Each structure stands twice: as structure tokens, then as C-alpha cells.
Image (spheres, grey):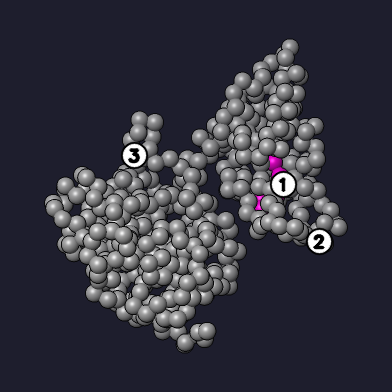
């Protein structure tokens, strides 16, 4: 069965006597006569595989004829000449496997019939004012039609409660796409390592990364690339990427491509001149050990909390060993003294969104156990800010290592394992490309 049809059928089975309305994304104006690059709504894409804007999927399990219906743009020769081809209403049923398709212009007229008899409307209120007005007007029309006969919508709920757990477990097709994204991202990071040398600018490394992504078939990055040299590496979400790379400093690169709307999310850190100093190496060794300890805890039945705790313990022990923390290991963990140097979590879900949907704790506030098909990042780091009261030799050093890890039946698969991160491999590759021009 086509994966999108299967997903729709699973959602149809879950909403029983409800109706789900799931809009596509709209184009967003950037300025004047220009728009931002279009990115489809992730849940809409998950259920349709349709990558055009201005569409609405309606799922109505109790409709007598059409349980899955798509409203979309019609073919328009003039607009297609200017802006590209459209699937069109006539081809939507065959290509997308929906039961029926109608022009988007008929949404107001036809939507009330799908709401008649439904008890629950699954729709995300508050993300699109214009679409909200359409949906609420259709609900009112349906109530008028059914006031004297049958059920009316009494509850509006988010479809996320049903769809997000579905999205959290990746199918074989999704995993294959994420492997491709990881592979292309790896090529970008390796090209950036080879090109790095003192005197280049952060944005030049960013350009090399993103060239490799697009050359490899990825349409875009999964998020704004972080290319942070020197002290900038201690800023978690630094993305200015305009400063010059200095001899003797580290470069932290947090960047991943997006392949067919699926994200990769990788961080590597390497020395600008190709050789770690003693202090940089000491910090790096701790983060690498924490990264590996965290990955080892990605196992079915365990939780993200398990690999976060493994990373925290490894980092805290390392910080004590090099003198940045004092006292016992347990005391430092209990009092969270490590947070001066490591202030974020050790991972997040990954999929159609770079911080993908899915809960981390259940209704009883217990950690969600890892299951085969989940994909998580594992991303410990140490950031020694200049204003910390600590050994001056370590100040302004920032290191993070991030991998994308699939939970398997008997353990895990590190999708980004081949991207260099051991010190000897990094020192062998950094700066190995022919020298680029430096202005």
C-alpha cells in the first residue's frame, strides 16, 4: 500500500466519528515581488506527499462516498508559465490516492457536508486566521444543516495528539530518506573540514557546506547553519557567520541538509589550523566520551533521559578531572554545577522537523521509552564562556558533537557515524584541500 494512503487510513481509523481538516502551507512574502522559499507543512506532507501550497486535506471516516478529499489549486496555463507546473484537480486522485479532489475555490461550499454528523473536529486553530474563519464558518453551516437531525461538532481538538505519535516512529521509507540526508550532510561537513584554514571567513565555510548539500540533491538546509569560530562557538545558536577564522581557535559547525523534507542535524568541531592545542584536546576528549556514552544508551526500552544522564555524568567527571569543577562527582551532578559549562539537553527527536514532533514524557510524567523506528540526536557539548570564574587557559573554547541515531530492534544505528569526529581523523582531514583564495 502507498505509505501516504496507509497513514491516512490509520488516522481515519483513529478519529472515528470525527473529521480532520489539515491545510497545506501558504507562500509567505519576503519583500516586494519575492517570496521565501516554500516549505510544506510537515504533517500535511506526511499524510499526502503533496508539495504544493494552498491545499486542504479533509478526512471524514463516516462520509458515505469520500473519506479522504483534497482541495487544491486548479491548473492555470498563465500562472504555470510564470510559477511552475501544478498537479491540478484532474490528476490528484490518481497521483495521490485520495477518494476525491475539488478546486480550492469550492472549499467554502463543500466543507459543511463533510462536517455534518461529526462529533469532533480535528483542526489546529490559531495557525492561519483566514483558514480558521473558513473552517469555523463551515462548522456553523453544518450545525444549521443538522440542528433538527443528527449530531453536530461539539469539540475541536488538535490532530497532533493522534498524528505526532505516528510521525515519531519512522517507516522504512522515511529511514531510507534520512540515511540519504545524513550521507549528504556528511559530505558537506567533510568538504568544510578539508577547506578550513586560518584567514577564511565563517560564511565561506558555510558556502562550502551548503554547496555540497545542493550538489548532492538536497533542496535546502534543515535549519540555519551555525558556523562558529573561536569564542562564537560558546554561543549555542550563533548564526551570524560573518567573522574571520583565527589561527589557534576551534570551529564549531552545526548544520544539516533537508532531503525530501526530512532533516539531518549534525555538529562537528575542529581546529582551524588542523591541530588541537592541549586545552582544546582536553575539552574535546570529554565531549567525545560523552557523545559515545550517550549513543550507547540509545536502546529500545530506555529513554532520552538515560542518554542525557550518561552524557552529564561523563562531562561532569571530565570537568572535575581538568579542574573546571571541584568536589565530588555526585555532588556536582546533584547541584547541577556542570550547567555553567553544559546547559542544554542531550538530544531531540528528528524527522520531518529538525526538532521533530513527539512527546518526551507521558501523562504520568514518566519518560517515553525508546522504540525501534525513533530517531534522536545525541549532542553533548562544553562551552567555556569568557566571563566564567575558571582557569583562563580554557576560556572561549566551545565544543559540541552531534549525531543522528536510529533506534533499532536490538540497539541503534548511528546514521552519521562516518562523519569524522575522532581527533586523529579530524587532524588528518582539516586543511587537506588545495588552498582557497583568502582576501
Residue 79 position by quadrant: bottom right
* Numbered mark located on residue 54 in the image: 1
Residue 317 position by quadrant: bottom left
Helix, strand or loop at mark 3: loop
Is tag 1's residue or tag 2's residue first in the polypeptide sequence? 1
Please state the extent of the stretch shown in magenta in the rendering. Answer: 50-58
Q: Is residue 53 magenta?
A: yes
Residue 167 x, y percent position in the rendering = 50, 45
The overriding secondary structure of the stretch rendered in magenta is: loop
Q: Are marks 1 and 3 in contact (CB under 8 Å)?
A: no
> With respect to residue 99, does 42 lie above or below?
below
Helix, strand or loop at mark 2: helix
Callout 1 environment at 10 Å: few (<14), some (14 to 19), or many (20+)? some
Q: Is residue 317 visible?
A: no
Q: Is residue 94 magenta?
A: no
Q: Which residue is mark 2?
A: 82
* Numbered mark located on residue 171 in the image: none
Callout 2 environment at 10 Å: few (<14), some (14 to 19), or many (20+)? few
> With respect to residue 200, does 321 lie above or below?
above
Q: Which residue is mark 3?
A: 367
| Near-viewer residue (386 or 412) | 386
Residue 336 x, y percent position in the rendering = 25, 47
Q: Are marks 1 and 2 in contact (CB under 8 Å)?
A: no
> With respect to residue 43, does 315 lie above or below?
below
Residue 390 x, y percent position in the rendering = 23, 61
Q: Is residue 347 visible?
A: yes
Label 1 and label 3: CA atoms lie apart by: 38 Å
Amino acid at each position: 500500500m502507498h505509505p501516504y494512503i496507509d497513514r491516512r487510513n490509520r488516522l481515519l481509523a483513529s478519529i472515528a466519528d470525527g473529521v480532520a481538516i489539515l491545510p497545506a502551507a501558504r507562500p509567505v512574502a519576503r519583500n516586494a515581488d519575492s517570496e521565501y522559499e516554500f516549505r510544506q507543512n510537515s504533517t500535511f506532507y506526511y499524510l499526502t506527499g503533496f508539495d504544493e501550497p494552498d491545499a486542504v486535506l479533509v478526512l471524514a471516516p463516516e462520509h458515505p462516498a469520500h473519506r479522504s478529499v483534497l482541495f487544491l489549486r486548479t491548473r492555470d496555463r498563465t500562472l504555470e508559465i510564470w510559477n511552475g507546473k501544478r498537479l491540478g484537480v484532474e490528476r490528484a486522485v490518481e497521483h495521490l490516492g485520495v477518494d476525491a479532489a475539488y478546486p480550492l475555490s469550492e472549499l467554502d461550499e463543500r466543507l459543511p457536508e463533510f462536517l455534518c454528523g461529526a462529533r469532533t473536529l480535528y483542526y489546529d486553530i490559531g495557525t492561519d486566521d483566514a483558514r480558521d474563519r473558513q473552517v469555523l464558518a463551515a462548522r456553523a453551516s453544518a450545525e444549521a444543516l443538522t440542528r433538527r437531525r443528527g449530531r453536530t461538532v461539539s469539540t475541536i481538538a488538535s490532530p497532533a495528539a493522534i498524528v505526532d505519535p505516528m510521525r515519531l516512529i519512522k517507516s522504512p521509507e522515511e529511514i531510507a530518506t534520512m540515511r540519504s540526508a545524513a550521507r549528504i550532510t556528511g559530505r558537506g561537513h567533510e568538504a568544510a573540514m578539508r577547506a578550513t584554514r586560518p584567514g577564511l571567513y565563517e560564511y565561506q565555510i558555510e558556502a562550502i557546506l551548503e554547496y555540497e548539500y545542493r550538489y548532492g540533491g538536497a533542496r535546502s538546509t534543515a535549519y540555519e547553519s551555525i558556523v562558529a569560530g573561536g569564542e562564537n562557538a560558546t554561543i549555542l545558536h550563533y548564526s551570524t557567520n560573518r567573522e574571520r577564522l583565527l589561527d589557534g581557535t576551534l570551529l564549531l559547525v552545526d548544520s544539516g541538509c533537508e532531503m525530501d523534507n526530512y532533516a539531518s542535524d549534525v555538529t562537528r568541531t575542529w581546529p582551524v589550523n588542523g591541530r588541537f592545542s592541549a586545552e582544546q584536546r582536553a575539552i574535546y576528549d570529554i565531549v567525545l566520551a560523552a557523545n559515545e556514552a550517550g549513543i550507547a544508551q540509545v536502546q529500545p526500552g530506555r529513554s532520552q533521559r538515560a542518554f542525557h544522564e550518561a552524557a552529564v555524568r561523563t562531562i561532569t567527571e571530565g570537568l572535575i578531572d581538568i579542574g573546571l569543577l571541584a568536589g565530588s562527582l555526585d555532588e556536582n551532578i546533584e547541584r547541577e554545577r556542570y550547567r555553567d559549562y553544559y546547559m542544554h539537553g542531550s538530544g531531540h527527536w528528528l524527522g520531518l522537523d529538525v526538532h521533530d514532533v513527539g512527546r518526551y514524557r507521558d501523562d504520568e510524567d514518566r519518560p517515553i521509552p525508546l522504540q525501534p523506528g525513533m530517531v534522536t540526536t545525541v549532542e553533548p557539548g562544553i562551552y567555556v564562556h569568557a566571563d566564567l570564574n575558571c582557569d583562563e587557559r580554557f576560556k572561549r573554547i566551545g565544543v559540541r558533537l552531534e549525531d543522528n541515531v536510529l533506534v533499532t530492534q536490538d540497539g541503534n544505528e548511528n546514521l552519521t557515524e562516518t562523519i569524522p569526529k575522532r581527533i586523529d581523523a579530524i587532524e588528518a582531514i582539516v586543511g587537506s584541500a588545495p588552498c582557497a583564495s583568502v582576501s
